[in-house]
Image (cartoon, rainbow, N blue to C red):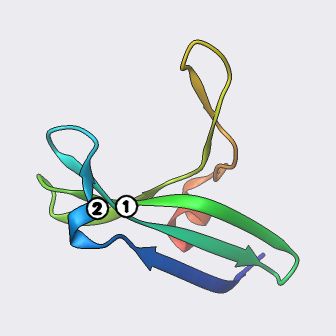
């Protein structure tokens, strides 16, 4: 499986929001795999302590504000590809 398209939408500086004291939500991404499967609403996070970006996969609210990842990488090799 390979990533065939990547779209990143950066949030305007005035709309960037702090998720906690060390993380800021700075954008959203969409990935297309093998031109047949799309994953939308991937959060792009900036970590202030480590000074690097990472992604957070989409979540689904189950109940009582508890969430569950909708999509996720099963192993580290694929996580690195993303």
Classify residue 70 as left or right of residue 82: right
Residue 30 to residue 62: above or below: below
Residue at 73 percent of width and 77 percent of height? 32
Q: Secondary structure at mark 2?
A: helix
Residue 71 percent location from the top left of the image: 69, 49
Q: Residue furthest front?
A: 14
Residue 57 to residue 37: above or below: above
Task: Please name whichever residue, 34 or 6, is drawn nearer the observer in this view of the structure.
Answer: 6
Q: Residue furthest top?
A: 64
Classify residue 80 as left or right of residue 5: left
Task: Please name whichever residue, 37 or 64, is drawn nearer the observer in this view of the structure.
Answer: 64
Classify residue 16 as left or right of residue 68: left
Mark number for residue 73? none
Residue 33 percent location from the top left of the image: 76, 76
Residue 81, by quadrant, is: bottom right
Task: Please name whichever residue, 57 or 41, is drawn nearer the observer in this view of the structure.
Answer: 41
Label 2 CA crowd tier, 10 Å (few <14, some 14–19, many 20+): few
Lower position in the chain sequence, tag 1 or tag 2: 2
Q: Nearer the viewer, mark 1 or mark 2?
A: 2
Mark number for residue 15? 2
Residue 42 to residue 19: above or below: below
Residue at 60 percent of width and 49 percent of height? 58
Q: Are marks 1 and 2 in contact (CB under 8 Å)?
A: no
Residue 6 percent location from the top left of the image: 60, 83
Say which quadrant the N terminus sits in: bottom right
- Which residue is under mark 1? 54
Q: Secondary structure at mark 1?
A: strand
Residue at 69 percent of width and 43 percent of height? 70
Say which quadrant the C terminus sits in: bottom right
């Amino acid at each position: 499986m390979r990533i065939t398209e990547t779209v990143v939408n950066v949030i305007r500086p005035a709309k960037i929001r702090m998720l906690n004291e060390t993380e800021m939500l700075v954008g959203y991404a969409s990935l297309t795999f093998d031109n047949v499967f799309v994953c939308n609403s991937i959060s792009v996070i900036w970590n202030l302590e480590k000074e690097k970006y990472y992604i957070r996969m989409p979540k689904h609210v189950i109940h009582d504000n508890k969430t569950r990842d909708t999509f996720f990488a099963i192993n580290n090799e694929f996580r690195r590809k993303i």
